[in-house]
Structures are given as structure tokens and as C-alpha cells.
Amino acid sequence: MKYIQAIKQNKVAYLFLLPAMLVMLCLVFIPLVQGIYYSLTNIDQYNMGNRFVKASYRFIGLQNYISIFSGEGFAEFSKVFRQTLIWTFVNVFFHFVIGLGLALLLNRHVRGRAIYRTLLLIPWAVPSFVSAFAWRWMFNGQYGFINLMLAKLGLQPIPWLSDPFWAMTAVIITNIWLGFPFMMVTMLGGLQSISKELYEAAYVDGANRIQQFFRITLPQLRPTIFVATLLGVIWTFNMFAVIYLITEGGPYNSTQILVTYAYNKAFSSWQLGEATTYGVIILSMLLAFSFFYTRLLKMEKEQ
């Protein structure tokens, strides 16, 4: 009754929310429930059905999950999961370090600050697939810009896209290029919200710039850092375009992450049931990470 009364009292507000809720229902919640159901079936290209043949896949319970977390399936999952963690941690670390460093520089009174800010936003403004194709050309072993420059300097060319280590390095460099502007803008907004009176009081008390950074800047930036790194982890963990457009997960699956691996399972191997199982696992991991990350920040605030 309480909820019905609340809806009656705020019916105009709920009326405005209704279209958005319907779109969310159609584009998010129904596909989500459908994906979870498919993860409990043996659906593939032969039994999925079409307009002429009736679907014949069946419910198999947790068999897809058991296959992934046991035997050879677990070996594959462990390898891809380890690569996903490396990919996510290295990218978010450099996004944060570079973004915070540039934000600190742009927060100072320097000539041409607006021009620098605009130039640094270019990687973010260019569509990610355009940047990915440009970097793919630059990483080309024979005709790529980077190896041509190395040759002019008398250095050996690097097998960017044919060696497992250098292939992972190449996609990480590309994603760092694409991701640091978001972190820079977010950190810059957080820095400009810090009261200058805090720095003036610290200056009067004799605190140097390093002490001001660790005693004022970082504590005041903590909510901004939390939101930015949380979004950074979620976006990087799910980043599909960069890896798929540059290496397609190769060589030898050395740059596969969970998202690209699930895509290959779905549209290369046509193991749709196992692919949706990977999707549910990815969603569960990100929900668990978000929950514990939020709890950690809340515990720090309470202390």
C-alpha cells in the first residue's frame, strides 16, 4: 500500500520514467534473463532453430559451468582469466597515473592551458575503432611507422603482432592511449573542486608541495578516484574493440580476454550455451568486484 500511495502521489515523475524503464526492460533485462537461461542449455548452431526448423536445444542445468571450471575447460579459463587480469590492471594503473599527472599539470596556471586540454582530449574524441585501425597499421612488422622509426635509429624491428608478449604490449599501449583522457578529465574536475583555502592554510603551516599532495590532494580526491577507477576497471575488463580489431585475440590466443573469448565461442565455434556461460561469469565477477570495492570505500570512510 505504501508503494502504491507513493506512485499515486508522484505519478507525473513515474510517467516520465516509464519510457526509460521500458527501454531498459527490452534492451537490458530481457536479454539478461534470456542469456542466463541459455547458459543452462546446450544451445549451439545445430539446435538453435530458425524460421524453418524448430529449436531442439534442451536444459542441462549447470553442465556448462562444470565444463568451464573443470578439466581442460578450466585450463583455458585460467589462461584467459590471467590475461584479463593483466590487461585490466596494467591499463587502469597507467590510465590513473598518466591521467592524474596530466590533471595536476593542467590544474596549474600555465599559458595555453585550454589548447593543451583540447589536444589531450583528441584520443578520447576519435572513435575507438578508428584509433584501433591506426595503431594496427603503426604496429605492422614490415611497413608500420614504429618499426620504420626503429630502423632509422639503427634498432631491430619488434614483432608487435606476431609475438605473444609484444602483441599484449601493443594492445595495452593502444588502450592506454584511448583511456587516459577520461581519467585526466575526471581527475581535473576533482582537483578543481578542492578548496584553495586548504592549500593556503597548509602553506602557512609550512607544508611543502609533497606534503600537500599526500595530506590534502589525495584524501580530497578519494571519492573521485573511487568512481573513476571503478568505471575504468569495468570498461577495461569489457573492452572488446581494441583487442578484436588489432590482434583478434592472437597470436595463439595470447591476447584473448574473457570478452573476446566469449565472442569467439559464440560466433567462431558457435557454442552459444558456453558463450553465454562466460557472459554470466563476467557479469558475476564485475558485480562482486563492484560490491567489495564499494564496501571497502565505505569501511575507510567509517574509520
Image: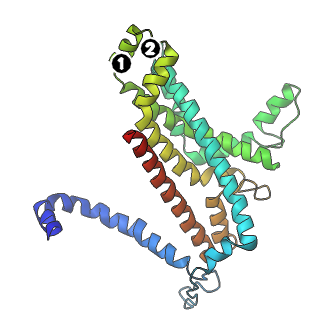
Q: Nearer the viewer, mark 2 or mark 1?
A: 1
Q: Amino acid at mark 1?
A: Leu
The relative height of residue 236 versus residue 23 in the rendered view (above or below) is: above
Q: Residue at position x 56%, y 90% from top?
A: 52
Q: Secondary structure at mark 2?
A: loop
Q: Is residue 23 above or below residue 137?
A: below
Closer-to-camera residue (18/100) = 100
Q: Position of residue 37 (x, y in %)?
A: 50, 78
Q: Earlier in the sequence, mark 2 or mark 1?
A: 2
Query: Given the current orientation, which residue lies at the most extreme front position?
Result: 303
| Mark 2 closeness class: few <14, some 14–19, many ≥20 residues within 10 Å | few
Can you identify the residue that label 1 sits on?
198
Q: Which residue is mark 2?
A: 109
Quadrant location of the C terminus in the rendered image: top left
Question: Which residue appears at 56% of the width and 76% of the height?
Answer: 39
Q: Position of residue 83 (x, y in %)?
A: 69, 53
Give the left or right position of residue 142, taking residue 15 as reference: right
> Quarter-wise, where is residue 250 in the image?
bottom right
Give the CA separation, mark 2 to mark 1. 18 Å
Residue 175 visible at all: no
Residue 291, picture quadrant: bottom left
**Is residue 29 positioned above or below 159 on the image?**
below
Which image quarter is the N terminus in? bottom left
